[in-house]
Amino acid sequence: MADGQSVYIAARSLANDIAFCSAERMVDQSPFLRRLNNEWGSNIILLHLAKSMWFPANLMILRLLVASTLAQNFGETAPFIVQYPSEFEPSFLFKLVPKLKVHFYRTYRKKFNRHQVFIVLWLLRHTFRKMKWRLESIAGKTRELIDTKPDRPSLMLLQEDDISLDRSYRTQPHWLFPDYVPPFRTLILQTSSLQKLLSQPQELQKQSVFFLSFRDWSLALRGQRVLPVQERLRKDLRTCLFRTFFGRSPEIFASSALILLFKIAGELAAFCQRANIRAFMTCENYMKHADAMQLIAPSLGIRTHSYQYSNMYAVSSIMMTTADIMVTFSKMYQRRWTYKGVTPKEFVNAGYPFSGSFKYLQERAIQWRTQLTKAGASFIISYFDESVQTDKYGCIKDEDHLSEISELLKLVIHNPSFGLIIKSQFKRNSPRCFGKIAKERTAAEATGRYMELVYGTHRNIIFPAEAALSSDIVIGHMVGATAGLEAAVAGVRCILLNPYGIKGDNDALYAQADIVYPSLGAALEAIHDYRRGMPRSAHLGDWSPIIDHFDPFRDGLSGHRLRTLLEQAVLRGPDLKAEIFVGPKK
């Protein structure tokens, strides 16, 4: 971009505006959608439509911005031909690309468009799976995992991470510790086809934590009486189904998106009634189940919660929520979850959510540092990557990822005083998965001063703090920057790399400390100066001047605060104002 920012990053921010503006126009111009949004309240219909439009809007904007950047080489306006988007109104896009003359084309209109075909196939698959599971249940091949008449109220979570009570890894539920048995059940619902690692199932059940697969919670819906909220949902679903096939063009996409929402919400309502669900919580608000729960919760007396898990420099529409309570790291983040009348009803600050696990990492962290020190390392660097995108419009490519790792491996190979720990965000991005750097990696391992920390099913669930507490300094990225913040909360120096020109709400704070560097090479130069005792690098990676803005507590009790909040919701009902233990500031 002209301001030096990566097109990928700029497009994500612009997509948020386009998605919301398109959703607002669609709701305003459609009496049907306007009625739904008003009747269900909290702008939840508007938000869900904006979420549904975000991905196609982001892809369209990426194409336009790339073409606009290339068009700067021409002396006149360049033509750009692109398929007309069926999900949103494209007129919002024109002012973004003054260097382009945009021409839209439409594909030949067949009897059904792709949104109609998707709905038919989804409903058929959904119905077939339920029939199959119920036949298996009748034949005695499966059994139900939840009580028909539970003796205790329940909290419902969505599957987001590996499930375990081992607090030394980033697992779910993170606020529950082995020495504490909650006075309620915790039911974790599978929401994706990704198979998570279910470790210690017996220990989980001792804590009244149960994981329910698609089959498990589908079978729990049998024999339930129809609730008033389900009647409303079925009525609106039928209307949406009609408008998907016979409505006006702008309503077809919106109606098809709402069919899925209402279908899931109806099944969740039946499940919540049977399982005595009193509270709900998730952090992954992009899931349809999160919005579905916001629809039905007021009618069922359920208190809904969301919590911040990432050091987000901006919050896109897909991560927004209308939950009763949004738990944030600090007050600084609250306005990022408020946009165009869509906001949680209440905010509560609790600090960095995983800080309670730091004490469980100490033993392994000491082990790693001892191992590298014995091999001759007198200064240890930990490196945290960010998610690598494999599509052609991605921000961080394999080449970028491997270039930084290669530079660090060479540092270890050629400088016997350096030790290196690499902790990737996902298992697939660990250096061991890339043959291009196999030779350098083998040479670094041979020194004994290099290691990779990897564990988990999909995500690498080793905490960044484990690597940080083994190190003298940490190198992370501005993209995400959560791993870097975790290291800083743990009290370790941390540098953030920003080769993609990211601009965000945290920039003014970062500028108050010696934290951000434009490249790995610049960061390593600063580290060499720091080791030589150069005065200009004395405060390298030191977050102490600004850390209170990110986490004003830093006492390791964030998980306990969240647990207190959930106990109030489950045991005392949805109408009481949230009361949370604040604890002493550090």
Image (cartoon, grey):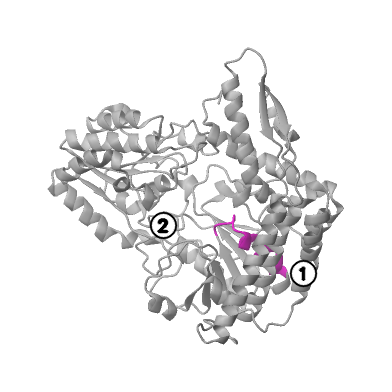
The structure residue drawn at horizontal position 41% and vertical position 57%, both measured from the top left corner, is: 458
The structure residue drawn at horizontal position 86% and vertical position 53%, both measured from the top left corner, is: 31
Residue 229 is left or right of residue 484, and the answer is: right
The amino acid on which the numbered mark 1 sits, given as a three-letter code, is Arg
The image position of residue 258, as x and y in percent, is 72, 58
Point out the stretch of residues depicted in magenta.
Answer: 283-298
Residue bearing mark 1: 234
Is residue 25 at all visible to an observer of this figure? yes
The structure residue drawn at horizontal position 70% and vertical position 40%, both measured from the top left corner, is: 85
Marks 1 and 2, Cα distance to the nearest angstrom? 36 Å
- Front residue of 375/87: it is 87
Residue furthest toward the top? 75
How dense is the environment of label 2, judged by Cα within 10 Å: few (below 14), some, or many (20 and up)? some
Q: Decide: is 325 above or below 546.
A: below
Count of numbered marks: 2
Q: Decide: is 382 above or below 535.
A: below
Residue 423 is left or right of residue 480, and the answer is: left
Q: Secondary structure at mark 1?
A: helix
- Front residue of 460/389: it is 389
Res 279 quadrant in image = bottom right
The structure residue drawn at horizontal position 51% and vertical position 82%, both measured from the top left corner, is: 142
Q: Secondary structure at mark 2?
A: loop
Res 65 quadrant in image = top right
Res 88 quadrant in image = top right
> Which corner quadrant holds the N terminus?
top right
User: Which disc number belongs to residue 262?
Assistant: none
The image position of residue 389, as x and y in percent, is 46, 42
Residue bearing mark 2: 458
The image position of residue 276, as x and y in percent, is 62, 79
Q: Decide: is 308 above or below 10.
A: below
Q: Decide: is 362 above or below 221.
A: above
- Front residue of 84/314: it is 84
